[in-house]
Image (spheres, rainbow, N blue to C red):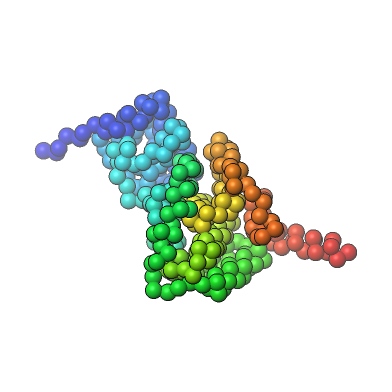
Amino acid sequence: MSKARKRNEKLAAAIAEAGWSHAQLALAFGRVAAEWRAEDRAGVGRSHVSHWVAGSMPSGLAPDILAETLSRRLGRTVTTNEIGLTTVASSPILDWHADTLTALVDLGRSTLDVERRSVLRAAGYSAAALALPDQPWWDRLAEGTAKRRVHQGGRLVGAGDLEAVRETVQLFTRIDQRRGGGHARAAVVQYLTSDVAGYLRASYADEDVRRGMFSTAGELAYLVGWMAFDNSEHAIAQRYFAVAVKLAAEADDAPLAGHILRAMAHQAVDLGHHQQAVRVAEASLDGRRYEDRQSTRTFPDRSGPRTSPRRRRTARGRRASTSSG
């Protein structure tokens, strides 16, 4: 005799908090599933939701899509645990409180491994992850990093190492500006999550070198994010943008963090999440994150309207012709 299912009171409570009927949740679920390109989940209806509330366990990506759907409705992050479900697709990469370097390495492995990359793509873009941490989080990352990591590792990283990484990042940036379309992205990810990640865990000659290394790593993660954006891999792009923000925060590089947040707002607008985009854009202008650093460093301008690599090259050719004429 089969064991009777236990009603999922957590899911029922979340639906009640959202003020939705089962049919309304199913409709919203379908929109998120379509956005995530989870075609097998797009046909979910009222009866599916009723079965889940009654105790059935949804399969595949359904728990994550449910959590994302409710997060958007409630304006806060809703986890699968909070609604009484478990999932294998969820990743700590978008957890703002997870260790930055662990998230970076895990993300790199996920994007370089074919099977894990397919899971990451299927996980979808998360509007709920656009709920940014409060100011104490930024302060903790900026102040606590040196205490945690300055004495780790047997190698001492100096100004020469930092300069070498900066030159490599500039090389990758020039390649991306010339070729676009995610060209050489695997090489960039490999360099970021092996060579650069090794530097991030090492000891430093001084605090300026440490902050410079974390800022440069943040710029490189930001570049990978735009490469994924160019290929319409928005879930991957979002995760690299998030890691880039955390690296900038650990460097106490507020202007870089603001620049990356504006890219995240741009992505949110493109995907139709306008309210969340406004909140992220406002956060990017908060305090030191809007300081002008043009006199010391110029950020790559990737946040304008997106065009194909060929159209970008054509536009650059026209500008060159105009200036020479």
From where the camera sits, is residue 194 visible?
A: no
- Residue at screen point 47% across, 68% down: 204
- Residue at screen point 39% across, 52% down: 98
Seen from the viewer's position, the closer of residues 25 and 273 is 273
- Looking at the image, residue 311 lies above or below residue 85: below
Q: Quadrant of the N terminus?
A: top left
Residue 167 figure quarter: bottom right
Residue 62 figure quarter: top left
Would residue 60 be found to the left or right of residue 179 on screen?
left
Residue 15 in the image, given as x and y percentages of width and height: 36, 29
Would residue 225 be found to the left or right of residue 99 on screen?
right
- Looking at the image, residue 172 lies above or below residue 229: below
Residue 218 in the image, given as x and y percentages of width and height: 53, 59
- Residue at screen point 67% across, 60% down: 296
Q: Residue furthest left?
A: 1
- Looking at the image, residue 221 lies above or below residue 39: below
Q: Residue furthest right?
A: 325
Seen from the viewer's position, the closer of residues 157 and 276 is 157
Residue 106 in the image, given as x and y percentages of width and height: 40, 60
From where the camera sits, is residue 96 visible?
A: yes
- Residue at screen point 69% across, 56% down: 294
- Looking at the image, residue 198 lies above or below residue 319: below
Q: Quadrant of the C terminus?
A: bottom right
Would residue 258 be found to the left or right of residue 26 on screen?
right
Residue 302 in the image, given as x and y percentages of width and height: 64, 55
